[in-house]
Image: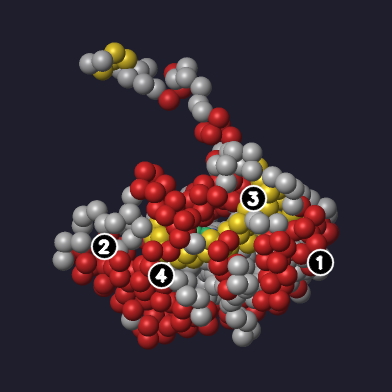
Amino acid sequence: MARAGPFGPALTMHASPAPLSAWARNVAPSPTLAVDAKAKALQAAGEDVCGFAAGEPDFDTPEHIKEACAAALRAGKTKYAPTPGIEPLRQAIADRYAAEYGLRATPAQVIVSPGGKFSCYLGVLATCSPGDEVIVPAPYWVSYPEMVKLAGAVPRFVLADDRTGFRLTPAMVEAAITPRTRLLILNSPSNPTGAVYSRAELEAIVAVALRHNLYILSDEMYEHLVYDGVRPTCVATLAPEAAARTITVAGFSKTYAMTGWRIGTTLAPLPIAKAISELQSQMSSNVTTFAQFGALAALQQKEKTSAALATMLAAFDRRRRHLHAELNRIPGISCLLAEGAFYLFPNISRFGLSDLEFCNRLLEQEKVAAVPGSAFGAEGYLRLSYATSDEIIAKGVTRFARFCAGLRAA
Ligand SMILES: *Cc1c(COP(=O)(O)O)cnc(C)c1O
């Protein structure tokens, strides 16, 4: 019963007669967070769950980064900061693009936003109007379709399955372009597949986009998480005109185990950078001021940061090879060895179950949490994150093999 307050009856959740907006009704909840929540609920109920669903590093943020943030907090860096970020951080981000990729950029082209997710959304909002089309390669990161729709634009999915290593060809991009196409989203290394495009492959795709005057949103969140001697490619460097059409998103979350800090970065041509800053000024203002000093330390104290990154990368690489080898030993499973991020994306279509059914039964029977490929626009696969301990990987993959053997016997 709703209790009466001083202004009439208190609101209850179910009593509201007002319909929600089209935005609220049409947005899909994040399926990756949903699986993770279900696994955590089982865990809280005392079940021994092996979680492969999480989309974040299992490491803690390196100590020197936390210390710089704590020092800034103690020094009173607790007020509003400029919307696009504190000046030394924007400078340090511009400097690192020059050092790592030879890309010349000014701090005015850099926007620091509350998380790379919001950086992507602002990039879409700054370039797309209602009715515009956006090419979204599938398997896609779960938020792209929703942020495109929230901008009033229309996602056009182009699926590249494991036969092309989850990588689009230029012809596939070309075939998806219409007069309404405004933006092409690229994400290499990829979440969910871990696939990394070669420089030559990206060059050919960028050439198609430039020929059709598209903008490119290049989500390079996993640029530093690459293995087997692979080098990441910064899409904005791929042609003289590419920098003028590309919005580069990156950040601190995945590289430095800083997911909870909420710091994303955008590098964009000046007019777009200004538009993004203005949108952000009305939607969220600056990233938490003292947190930005932690990010600054990550870029300035290079030796400590690269040592911490090297430790994490060595662990990810070991787990990646172990999980990959074990998965491919299971009859019915085939899995590519992804060269980036911290995900593998095995094909489970030979078992004759939908991926959703497969995941639900896997969680119920064996207490192994994975995300169905259909959450990423690719039915017949699973996303397994190896950002978890060697012990959980060993135990989880044993259970996984037992589950698959049971399905084959059935
Ligand atoms: C994690 C992730 C992001 C966003 O990261 P934030 O936590 O918002 O900084 C963006 N793109 C991809 C592909 C991701 O996996």
Q: Where, by quadrant of the figure, is residue 163 drawn?
A: bottom right
Q: Residue 182 carries which label?
A: 3
**How crowded is the residue under tag 4: few (<14 C-alpha within 10 Å), some, or many (20+)?**
some
Q: Name the image quarter holding the N terminus.
A: top left
Q: Disc 1 or disc 2, which is closer to the eye? A: 2
**x then y, percent, for residue 394:** 61, 73
Q: How far apart are marks 3 and 4 (CA)?
A: 25 Å
Q: Does the residue labelled 1 lie within 8 Å of ligand 1?
A: no
Amino acid beneath label 3: Arg
Q: Which residue is located at x 68 percent, y 49 percent?
A: 181
Q: Is mark 4 within 8 Å of ligand 1?
A: no
Residue type marked 1: Arg
Up the image or down, 219 lies above or below 318; here it is above
- Rendered image coloring scheme: secondary structure
Look at label 4 and name its amino acid: Thr
| Image disc number at residue 163 | 1
Q: Is residue 140 visible?
A: no
